[in-house]
Image (cartoon, rainbow, N blue to C red):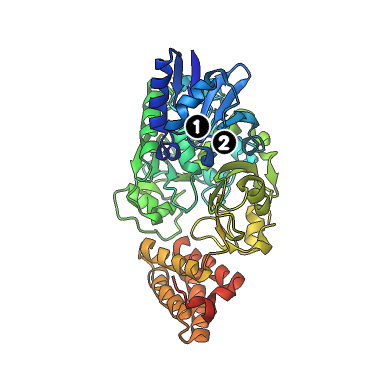
Amino acid sequence: MVKVFIPRDTTSLALGADKVAREFAVAAEQRGESVEIVRNGSRGLFWLEPMLEVETPAGRVAYGPVTKSDIDSLLEQGVLQGEQGHPLSLGLTEEIPYLKKQQRLTFARAGITDPVSLDDYQEHDGFKGLRNALQMDAQAIVDAVKASGLRGRGGAAFPTGIKWQTVLDAVPTGAVNGEGGQKYIVCNADEGDSGTFADRMVMEADPYMLIEGMTIAGLAVGATQGYIYLRSEYPVAHQILNEAIAKAEAAGFLGDDILGSGRRFDLEVRLGAEAYICGEETSLLESLEGKRGLVRAKPPLPAIVGLFGQPTVVNNVLSLAAIPYILDKGPQAYADYGMGRSLGTLPFQLAGNIKQGGLIELAFGLTLRELMDDFGAGTFSGRPARAVQVGGPLGAYLPESQWDTPLDYEAFSAVGAVLGHGGVVVFDDTVDMSAQARFSMEFCVAESCGKCTPCRIGSTRGVEVIDRIRNNENREANMELLTDLCDTMIDGSLCAMGGMTPFPVMSAVKHFPEDFEPQTAEGGA
């Protein structure tokens, strides 16, 4: 029986993967062919989805993007034998340059395994990190994470091991002589930044990795309860996570006796309510508690007073997903990748006006230009690229003069930019940067929790000021007012929502001033 792999992730489904899988099974049966269709996760080569792979003695052979109308010709030309004469043939999957040039640690299993198969996961090093962690004391686990150099992959880049140490050392309310009481592990899966999809890919392609990472985190800090706060716009991830959690519990990888160790860790998925602000950790905790998602003042930090007032680890999906590798291969194996203080790998997500959009996991240190040229293959429109926004809707717009900046947290900070969650959105030379600046302020108007005045009122006034500039109304005075307004938002906002909204605005003004001149503003947007 020939194994045929067809992805089941959101991107592939949106492009017709379910229909391809059904029709392929029917067509193969009609030809008397015996096939087993495995619904794997995506490899992240999104311009080739749905990408069909066939298992052969030489390895998997890929074809894509496959539509229903391609199935008969693929079968006629020997797809089940791995023949490569068809126009959609991509050769051996592992030899596709886009994939071969990557350094996949976190995404080593993505697209290879059936995401809800425990056997598949364990055959590809799954739960080795957890088994090691069960033989270690809590401090040793935390020390391993510290030694790896792992920093938060949600955007703030705070050292993960330091956060865990704080929670380990914190005494919960209700503890007696430092013992007992409740601590929590919370996974921030409210992935809302434009152009980002790495969290979703983890949950849809390799959910046990996240489950394993959260369980190890629980062992490290003494937490017995975990929550995955998932954005409601990810129904496929929701279904896969729940199925994976149920299977992990049944097999003893979760629950009150993890692998017979007597250690406990329970895990649940909780859905968000389509609020971007709940990607901010304290707003997320408020929402988890059943309250309106408002930002909390800090201090106290969530690591000390977090969910339900108890010490809480709040980490991003990618941060927790890196943990199994570190506990399996050792912290030095992870720290051997990267540069400076940015160690390990980051899954960069290439999107926007780009020909070859997808996920690229590489060690920190390559340049933005190399990422775009070596993997993106130019803009989708075929026009020259003009601006790149890195780090989501609160990230700065980078002109071509900054594209040789290394993809590293400190290097980006030095040029007034943020690397954030690794989202890279490309714009060609038709973009109106004054319109993009306006969008940034308008986005803050829509998504602000409204708790602090600089964010709530500043963004509203910001839209009005940019509109006056674009309409050439008292332009010089309004340009000065825009600068003052941005400074106030940066210095006075309660969280990064208001504090970072000026980054894209001021970068557009600084690097693309011609778009704010009267002759270009007349066209409006």
Q: How many marks?
A: 2
At which x and y percent is residue 85? 60, 26
User: Can residue 114 be seen in the rendering of this structure?
Assistant: no
Name the one closer to the observer, 384 or 142. Answer: 384
Name the one closer to the observer, 31 or 507. Answer: 31
Q: Are marks 2 and 1 in contact (CB under 8 Å)?
A: yes
The residue depicted at 57 percent of the width and 68 percent of the height is: 507
* Precedes in sequence: disc 2 or disc 1: 2
Q: Relative to residue 222, is residue 479 depicted above or below? A: below
Residue 457: image quadrant is bottom left
* Quadrant location of the C terminus in the rendered image: bottom left
Residue 325: image quadrant is top right
The residue depicted at 63 percent of the width and 58 percent of the height is: 412
Name the one closer to the observer, 417 or 303. Answer: 417
Q: Residues within 10 Å of mark 2 (few under 14, many from 20)?
A: many
Q: Relative to residue 34, is residue 311 depicted above or below? A: below
* Residue that badge 2 annotates: 106
Residue 59: mark? none
| Amino acid type at mark 1 | Met
Mark 2 residue element: loop
Q: Relative to residue 432, is residue 389 depicted above or below? A: above
Name the one closer to the observer, 437 or 123. Answer: 437
At which x and y percent is residue 349? 55, 47
* Residue that badge 1 annotates: 209
Distance from the alpha carbon under mark 2 to that under mark 1: 8 Å
